[in-house]
Amino acid sequence: MAGKVFAKKSKLSQVPRTGFIATGWSNGSPGLSGAGYGIRIPRAARDAYFAPEWTLVELRLEGWPEPVMVEIAKASWRTTCVELIRKDIGAWMLANGLAPWPRRRPPRFRVSWVQGNCFRVTKDDGGD
């Protein structure tokens, strides 16, 4: 796939395959198309699972027919921004009844590393 960059094997071979928990994110005024929604990645997970040289990540959203490519090339991804934002993510949340959510109670997701810059995202029932 064009734009796909893979992490050094040594980095990802040291992280647990079980993945991590992420939460839903909203810009405060999301649209019915799914725009304004995303997935907030914990900083420690970003640092452990996402290689600095990546410009894109591929998300395989549970039950969604096509992989979703999310750009992470912006400088803020490595400093202040920890959200994967794309209209398709919001459309998936809306289609699954995960959005909108009650104030301060975003949905939880299990994010599992598949290979390279590819991750599987599934709904999390809260049982950790």
Image (spheres, rainbow, N blue to C red):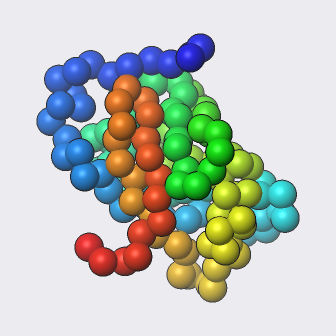
20 or 81, which is in the foreground?
20
Figure quadrant of the N terminus = top right
Is residue 37 visible in the rendered structure shown here?
no
Q: Is 65 left or right of 16, judged from the image as shown?
A: right
Does 70 sit above or below residue 120? above
Q: Position of residue 86 (x, y in %)?
A: 68, 46
Q: How many numbered tags mark residues here?
A: 0
Q: Is 8 left or right of 92, judged from the image as shown?
A: left
Residue sitting at 53 percent across and 24 percent down? Answer: 55
Does 51 sit above or below residue 87? above
Is residue 119 visible in the rendered structure shown here?
yes
Q: Quadrant of residue 67?
A: top right
Q: Is 5 left or right of 89, judged from the image as shown?
A: left
83 or 120, which is in the foreground?
120
Q: Is 76 left or right of 112, judged from the image as shown?
A: right
Q: Position of residue 34 (x, y in %)?
A: 77, 58
Does 33 sit above or below residue 11? below
Q: Quadrant of residue 114?
A: top left
Q: Quadrant of residue 124?
A: bottom left
- Furthest toward the top, the residue is 2
